[in-house]
Image (cartoon, helix red, strand yellow):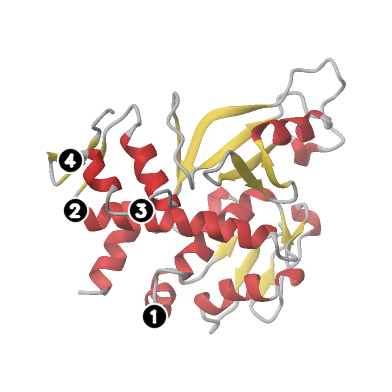
């Protein structure tokens, strides 16, 4: 087994990390995948590593929750939200209303999901915020995520600091992975690709497509090519994640 986790500058035996979690649990699987990767994952402390593993688990759980909810797929021009908490913008985004708690507003998406509809990249951001509801106290969440604007990657709160990188083979449960449809039907541009969450069991959640295998995602997207001879859809090497270390720093400082 490749030893690739360092904590406070010291290389740590990956088995010692994995043994921190119940056998065959998703947390153990996340730790295993981190330890068997092709890059070195560096952490300032064991708590920082555990925070990332916890948040990845909650991202998976929240994605599954959203898949079972009444949350609808809508293009931006037809998006919908609960006006009690959000103002729908001309572009189809959701802007937090003044004097509304960010914690309560995100919670409402899961409580009253049938009142909401948007496209897949916004759904990923909603999953990230939903996962943080399971870790951050309300006071911290409200103080960090002031003035939420749910629209696309360009409107993401700076404290999430979502970034995308190319990887060769590393695949960690909780990653956001992208299935690209390179020759999509111009009549259905919404199927140019699908942002998904890796659920860690060989399946992915994509908003509207639900939970499918990689083959299932590709098969669906292939139905929305220009024609049957067009290049097939495929899982790209891009991996998108929030800034786990920064989010841990906010959490750690709050609890001091």
Disc with the residue nearer the chain's start (2 vs 1): 2
Residue under label 2, please give it: 45
Q: Of residues 50 and 44, which is closer to you in this image?
A: 50
Q: Disc 3 to disc 1, how far (Cα)?
A: 21 Å
Residue sitting at 76 percent across and 33 percent down? 221
Q: Image height check: is 200 above or below 167?
A: below
Q: Disc 2 to disc 3, how far (Cα)?
A: 11 Å
Q: Disc 4 to disc 3, how far (Cα)?
A: 17 Å
Residue sitting at 28 percent across and 28 percent down? 1
Residue under label 3, please give it: 52
Q: Disc 4 to disc 1, how far (Cα)?
A: 35 Å
Residue under label 4, please give it: 12
Q: Residues within 10 Å of mark 2 (few under 14, many from 20)?
A: few
In what element is the residue under mark 3? helix
x then y, percent, for residue 177: 56, 38
Evaluate if marks 2 and 3 touch, with contact meaning CB atoms under 8 Å apart: no
Q: Of residues 102 and 251, which is closer to you in this image?
A: 251
Residue under label 1, please give it: 139
């Amino acid at each position: 087994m490749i030893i690739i986790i360092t904590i406070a500058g010291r290389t740590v035996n990956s088995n010692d990390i994995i043994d921190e979690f119940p056998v065959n649990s998703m947390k153990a699987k996340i730790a295993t995948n981190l330890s068997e990767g092709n890059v070195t994952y560096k952490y300032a402390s064991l708590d920082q590593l555990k925070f990332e593993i916890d948040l990845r688990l909650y991202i998976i759980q929240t994605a599954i929750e959203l898949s079972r909810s009444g949350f609808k797929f809508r293009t931006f021009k037809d998006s919908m939200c609960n006006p009690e908490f959000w103002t729908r913008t001309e572009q189809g985004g959701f802007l937090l209303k003044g004097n509304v708690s960010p914690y309560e507003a995100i919670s409402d998406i899961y409580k009253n999901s049938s009142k909401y509809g948007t496209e897949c990249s916004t759904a990923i951001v909603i999953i990230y915020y939903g996962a943080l509801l399971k870790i951050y106290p309300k006071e911290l969440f409200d103080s960090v995520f002031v003035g939420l604007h749910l629209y696309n990657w360009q409107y993401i709160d700076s404290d999430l600091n979502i970034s995308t990188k190319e990887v060769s083979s590393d695949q960690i449960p909780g990653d956001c992975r992208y299935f690209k449809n390179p020759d999509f039907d111009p009549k259905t541009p919404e199927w140019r690709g699908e942002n998904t969450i890796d659920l860690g069991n060989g399946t992915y959640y994509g908003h509207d497509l639900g939970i499918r295998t990689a083959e299932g995602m590709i098969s669906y997207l292939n139905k929305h090519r220009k024609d049957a001879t067009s290049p097939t859809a495929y899982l790209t090497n891009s991996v998108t994640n929030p800034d786990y270390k920064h989010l841990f720093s906010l959490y750690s400082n709050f609890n001091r």
